[in-house]
Image: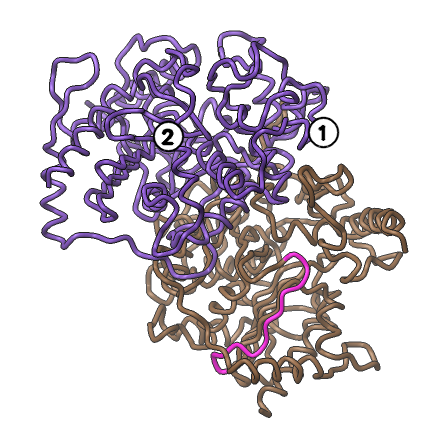
Chain colours: A purple, B brown
Amino acid sequence: MSSSTSNVIALTAGVVLALVAATGATAQSEPLSAQESDPTVMGWMQGFPPPPDKMITQPDSVYFSFPRLRWSVCHLREFLPTEEISRGLGAPVPLAYPAPHEFAELRQQIDAVTFTPQNSDEEMTWEESLYANYTDGMLILHRGEVVYERYIGCLEEDGKHAIMSMTKSFTGLLAEIMVVEGILDDTLLVSDIIPEIGDSAFATATVRQVMDMTTGVKYSENYSDPDADIWLYSAAASPLPKPEGYEGPDGYWEYLQQVQAEGNHGDEFHYKTINSDMLGWIISRVSGKAVTDLASDRLWRRMGVEQDAYQTVDGRGVPFAGGGITAGLRDLGRLGQLMLNEGELNGERLFPAEVVAKISAGGDRAKFGDGFPTFGPGSYTSQWWVLHNDHGAYAARGVHGQTIYVDPTAEMVLVRLASFPQAQNGFIDPTSLPAYQAVAEFLMSR
Amino acid sequence: MSSSTSNVIALTAGVVLALVAATGATAQSEPLSAQESDPTVMGWMQGFPPPPDKMITQPDSVYFSFPRLRWSVCHLREFLPTEEISRGLGAPVPLAYPAPHEFAELRQQIDAVTFTPQNSDEEMTWEESLYANYTDGMLILHRGEVVYERYIGCLEEDGKHAIMSMTKSFTGLLAEIMVVEGILDDTLLVSDIIPEIGDSAFATATVRQVMDMTTGVKYSENYSDPDADIWLYSAAASPLPKPEGYEGPDGYWEYLQQVQAEGNHGDEFHYKTINSDMLGWIISRVSGKAVTDLASDRLWRRMGVEQDAYQTVDGRGVPFAGGGITAGLRDLGRLGQLMLNEGELNGERLFPAEVVAKISAGGDRAKFGDGFPTFGPGSYTSQWWVLHNDHGAYAARGVHGQTIYVDPTAEMVLVRLASFPQAQNGFIDPTSLPAYQAVAEFLMSR
């Protein structure tokens, strides 16, 4: 295939996929494969300047649509204002690795691990799953040692990747730490902490309902509906100057002040990002610190991480607590290891073990519903997903395939960063969750 | 003075000063002092959310006007898209310090050093000069050891500060390294390297003329003239979406393609930022790397720095080679030390000594003119300012008081980061340059 023909196909597929993502419809045509859509193969942003058809620019409907998405997940700060999550100034604490020959052998063995995807009869190897899932980075720690590490697509060892809704799990972990330490009372109403929430539907929810996303708040993400809440939310959240005559909310927090009710607080789990933004506001108000500074003070400065992380902000400097973080693969592995170790890392206790005990125990399974059939009959608590499987696994998850997957029984932490063409993890779980379980079993048999 | 009265005065002074900066006129009223305008005292961006009158938001005419400027110089990435200048993943190499009691004693001694400001009869102490110049950070290295370090205003040890036009000296240093290493031929015409520069006035300039800013190019920064070039430049450079119907250049590089001639190449030094942007394009084209990656590969990853730096970008991801860098105080001290050591740092040679020999020797003094009376009869070469004084001092300089000042005779490196109300260093030199000389003499007498 000539390079120019390939480009036409790539761009067409990109437009189709963007529409698919936007409407939530099932893909009508096969998207470019992971190998075909590799950003280096596509030639995005190469050259000074790049050719016009290889340039990736605003708006987000362009830079964050497949296949451009595969480049942009590693370059969000180049499009948006951001705040740093500082690692401080000390030396990183290196992760432990096996001897090189053993590490190479482990990679071969893990690559050859087979599993059966959900709703399929055909076996797949671990290595095949990396490409099926448009993986950009994969790290597996077993008993605190790196047993597998791969960089594909836009990600490199010293690069960073958007973690999307795994950001929520940062926000939730910080909140749970504050709850366990007695700094935040999760039985309080939102209005007790933030009086100016006014008559927003959030006012009468408890902090715990916000943490577990069991609030009864209206927030529709139906992209085909011009009146869907997501449009006003996006307008509020954009750091760009508001359009002439715009009279809507400015920033995440003004948006939260006008949220309408839908259903009753406490009845059911509904996965709605505005809960995470509400939680970010709550922990900032209570602690007197931005979520970026909280994450830096409580986690990043104390974990021996290698890289600063960063978080996108709205036009008022408020970090996006529901999805704005970008971080390095190994540093996310350190966070997973900190969870597996129940709050200890590098010989230091960062928070009480009870924090992890509460998260890993999960939320109210009866309220989880059946909205996530590929994830299974799990639960969601403190902004973490709990599988309630035999291994007691739990996870941070973000669209387009991001995960930190903690398997306490296998003593395994797995981090996947990815740029799957479609946002919904329902497309990615079938070739991911059974793969994680298979690798966990392989590692337990070592 | 009550807090609310103080606020009113602060805001009024801010508006006045913004106008002064914009028109280039002399201040009509006394601005807030350094102590009064300290961003913590002012209360900028404190609270979740901050009170409306303490919020700092877009556009740059707001966030980058005094006194808000004093907060924003430490927070540029929160307003603008940026690219990282990566330090890599290794451990920082700590700077050397004297024993604590000696360090404390040195601070007392240096604070008490006196000097006579330009055009003044009244002596001033070193410590007074810090406030006179709205200093945010001051670092002095003597014989490779930190002898003085202060953080004031918005800057902290682990924070970063906009370095404004000191960015040009990064660009120029990288270019000079490439020239000395034979990668870049500074006798070539711009059009030899970048054919699509077209009939821009830059086309017929040599690379060396661009490096030394002796090009004959039209670029006026008269803010009171609505037809001044700066307005089109700003419109091109803005990362925000272009206004409806905008047909001008998009980004730094398209701007450069339409620059008109003014005077003859090689005749005289004219300090015009577009030369630095042109040089950034040249070294990116020749090296195949963005200036951020060049700075990372050639400097930041090899200097043992403590923090990543970053650089603002235009709407096409091109870093602002004329002024976009933000970095940490001590890391800039390392760069100064690398220059003083003629290309060696921490026992490693990063570039040939000839690079520093060429820069410190200066440019053609006959072409310097008398446009910088407070700086003196110096010269400008490879985007560095050379004083041609008894000590052979040379400097990187940026508006609002930024400097890396290298004094080879005194074996002294000094870094000042500041947020002086007015942009022009002509206001700051009188209480800075004689102070640097006095401290150099004190250190030589130790």
> What residue is shown at x 33% (from left), y 72% (from top)?
B348
Query: Can residue A248 be seen at all in this image of the molecule?
Result: yes
Give the image location of residue A38, x and y in percent: 27, 31
Which labelled disc corresponds to residue A361?
A: 2
The front one of A275 and A5 is A275
**Rendered position, A4 above or below B217:** above
Give the image location of residue A338, x and y in percent: 36, 45
> What residue is shown at x 51% (from left), y 65% (from top)?
B332
Q: Earlier in the sequence, mark 1 or mark 2?
A: 1
> What residue is shown at x 60% (from left), y 64% (from top)?
B397
Q: Inspect the image, locate mark 2, and give the three-letter code of the amino acid beneath it.
A: Ala
Q: Chain of mark 1?
A: A
Q: Badge 1 is on which residue?
A: A195
- The residue segment tinted magenta is B143-154
Query: Position of B7 compared to B299: left or right?
Result: right
Label 1 and label 2: CA atoms lie apart by: 32 Å
Is residue B152 one of those drawn in magenta? Answer: yes
Query: Position of A212 compared to B10: left or right?
Result: left
**Rendered position, B337 above or below B191:** below
Query: Can residue B58 be seen at all in this image of the molecule?
Result: no
**Rendered position, B446 above or below B24:** below
Query: Position of A262 compared to A108: left or right?
Result: right
